[in-house]
Amino acid sequence: MPSAVPFWRDPKKRAIVFQIVILLLVFGIAYVLFSNTQANLRRQSIATGFGFLKAESGFEIGESVIPYSSADTYGRALLAGALNTLKVSFIGIVLTTILGVFIGIARLSHNWLVSRLASVFIEVMQNIPVLLQLFFWYAIFYEAFPAPRQALNPLPGIFLCNRGLILAVPASHPAHLPMLIALFAALASWWLLARWARRLQDLTGRTFPVVRVGLSLCLLLPALVWLAYGAPTALDVPVLRGFNFQGGVTVSPEFGALLIGLVLYTSAFVAEIVRAGIQAVTRGQIEAAMSIGLRPAQVLRLVVMPQALRVIIPPLTSQMLNLTKNSSLAIAIGFADFVSVANTTINQTGQAIEGVALIMAVYLCFSLSTSLFMNWYNKKMALVER
Amino acid sequence: MADKRIKQTPSNTDRSIIEIIGMHKWYGEFHVLSDINLRVQEKERIVICGPSGSGKSTLIRCINRLEEHQRGRIIVDGIELTNDIKNIEKVRAEVGMVFQHFNLFPHLTIMENLTLGPIWVRKMPKQEAEETAMMYLKKVKIAEQAKKYPGQLSGGQQQRVAIARSLCMSPRVMLFDEPTSALDPEMIKEVLDVMIDLAREGMTMLVVSHEMGFAKSVADRVLFMDDGQIVEENNPHDFFDNPRHERTKLFLSQIL
Amino acid sequence: MNQQNSTATREHLKPPVTEIGVLGWIRQNLFNSWFNSLLTVLALYGLYMTIPPLFKWAFADSLWFGSPDACRDIDGACWSIIPSNARFIFFGFFPEDQQWRPLTAMILLFVLVFHTQNRRSWNRALFPIWTCGLVVMGWLMHGGLGLPVVETAKWSGLPLTLMLSLFGMVGAYPLGILLALGRRSKLPAIHSLCVLYIELIRGVPLISMLFMSSIMFPLFLPEGINIDKVLRAQVAIILFTAAYIAEVVRGGLQAIPKGQYEAADSLGLNYGQAMRLIILPQALKIVIPPSVGILISAFKDTSLVVIIALYDVLKTTKVTLSNPEWMGFSSEAYLSLALLYFIFCYAMSSYSRKLEKALHTGH
């Protein structure tokens, strides 16, 4: 029978003791910090808890998706800030993906000039801090563009001045909602059409131009609804009244600079990711596909893209998350995103801990949902190997 | 020795299935193929050998336009290979290619690998394509792996699937670019057996390979290429026993 | 049919002239299809519309050394904002007569970096050389022992940017390694703590960490103890960067074949020895290229301290622009600063790519 091992030499027991020591250390430090904090908060008469969310805020927000005024609560202010963050992140992600894919493909072009230009864009945008880029674009709005009275008018209905980009938009009309419904109907039929076409091909081998028909539907159906309502063409045109424009839609310099800066910066990274993904598909794959007789478009769709997307999607979602995190720099140029509003809240209430905790919690939500998506996607798409 | 050879008389048609006339190819300034003249008859089995860098892979890759030639003519089954994309696609549908590194599509099952061409190029209904695929999978003795993915198969199995994939397009000519060079020794035989069966059934084949046993038992002609030129061409018996050129003799002494 | 090509009389043919040389290159790379030709024409047109006016603004009509009033008279760029304010932009609030100290510290840093980038100097002496270098740099910046003390509140401009990145990396690396080892540990408490830390930090923006450091840290400390702002920001940068380094090092640890761990165990080495002598040297070598990437990000991210009112080189530039004399020349100032950042970052990323290639062929 083996003799009993003294506990300080038994690896399992040592492991437990080690963990207990570490946990005691961590919790000990946490406790010290905690009690210090409580003492300091009491000393400085700072409140604790989240009651401030119901108090009146007393400050204005530059722009907001939901109606908001200084008489509303801090809670509502923070909501407006969060919605602003989502707005700039969502639009930013869409634009970045489009621009990034375009530049990534351009980088791979056989045309030397196009490929070099794309390469220069990528190198320059990646190596300059995003905050500096934001300051630059914001300064362009303020210094390069004139006052509203002398606003630039490159196209009818479009004005550029230091108050932002002011656009003429179609005036609100009852036709708009039915048109939107028609668009959704068209998209739904496109999806159904694709399913039917796939079954047709399985049975008879004939292909059906799904994309062309689907796109036509998306253009045609809303157009028909528009005609049915009498083809309304009324525009909400911005008009100069006094020192500023009335009407139309204004893209503020803050929003514009933030969007442009984030999109240009992040698209450079996306371009590299797209390039790496496409190059990851070996030449042999393309040759094998071509030697079966597939056309270039078919090679791209059936062989290259499925393999390239597997390599592209995970780092792409990281970059989308980076864009969302970088949108927090809005505070430096005065756009009212969540961090900006939270910062004002902290300054007014003095409740730094709750404020910073809120900021971290909101961004953690974004990160965790992105991680969950990526894990799900990776599991689903992993190439099956031995 | 004659009884070991698989005797097939190449059919005597006037028109060769592949004609290469005065073909030259350059990579930049490098003259990689020089004055290639070759006529391949239907059902003929040709083995091309030579040192690395001699241009043998480049030659067969010109036949299905994976590489472009700059001078001379290449005519496959009556269709001339030019910049005309329609001709290129027609030729590629008639010519099957098996690569050294298999190049199976990793994101598709074996069955999907095989039916991809028939469905999208020949516009076959799915069921018909799958029946054809199953038939060829049985022929290369790998039918039970139909639902697996390439990453789950060994090298020899993958190469046999690659051969089946090309056969599904019912090609008139099969090109093999060093089909066994990337395989472990114990898997070479299973692939060569499939190729011998194919030859027995009368497929026109051009094989770039170092497998001299295969050349001796199956080939109608053996070509030796060096430095971009076809140096010697003969039936296997005379090629191996009475090589004429110094370079051929040197090469044979190095590999046999 | 026996074809015999006499090897001696091989016709020396030249490839078609449109395939080679300058003409061939132009044809293949710019005009090899109608689509490419269209792209080339469009690209050339776009360049023609933008480059000459830009050139005119930046060089032909510009003023390099002049007063702000002279600048307002010209149409072009006013680059003189940089030379006129160079001292402040680069050194910030550091006392003028002592500015040789940060300058010497920066030169020392560049010498060290230049020495290190040459792989032939990668030997045992490197570690003590760097330690001495860092100590000397710290002494030059701070003072004491013969030099008048300059509080950290006055450290600003380019030295602050470089220091925040450098000490950020130096401080974060050991912490990152510990976190990576902890995450791979089989002990549940250690593993959970490390995962919690890494995922938490990687999920939040740096700005929130900087806020935490500037607003929350003072609350954590007992009454009377004050840590100055620069140190607080430095700690935040270290804590933030460590999480990213941890993930990169973890990747390196995963890349080491299991056989190495087993060999170390079978030699009788304990955990610490195995890590120190066998595993970490190999893992760290693998992760050098991505680590340089993190260093580049850390360097760019120091610009965020603008938001908590620390005077790095971006903030000093902004302050210069708020001077009524020099107002309105933002483009020139920001473009010059962008050039500075670009040179640093591009040098680092080129080096990283070169290194990756060199290290890869060594495998």
Image: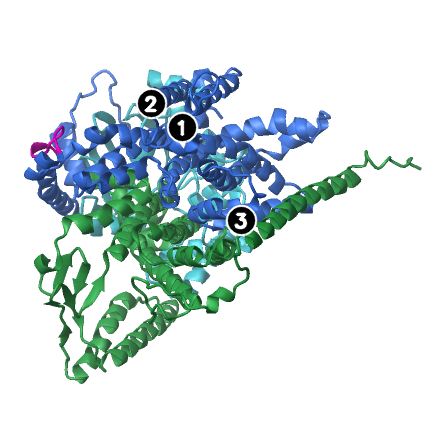
Q: Mark 3 points at which residue?
A: C199
Q: Which residue is drawn at 40% across and 40% down?
A: B99
Subunit bearing disc 3: C
Q: Could you give the CA–CA distance between mark 1 and mark 3, rounded to whole angstroms?
A: 31 Å
The image quadrant of residue A123 is top left
State the green chain.
A
Could you tell me which secondary element the residue under label 2 belongs to?
loop
Q: Tell me the residue at 34%/15% (across/down).
A: B246
Mark 1 or mark 2, which is nearer the start of the sequence?
Answer: 2
Residue matched to label 2:
C99
Viewed as shown, does residue C120 lie left or right of A175? right
What segment is highlighted magenta in the picture? Answer: C58-67
Chain in blue on the image: C
Neighbor class of circle 2 (other Cα within 10 Å; few <14, some 14-19, many 20+) is some
Earlier in the chain: of badge 3 and badge 2, it is: 2
Subunit of label 2: C
Are the residues under marks 2 and 1 on the same chain? yes
- Percent coordinates x, y for residue B122 in the rendering: 32, 59
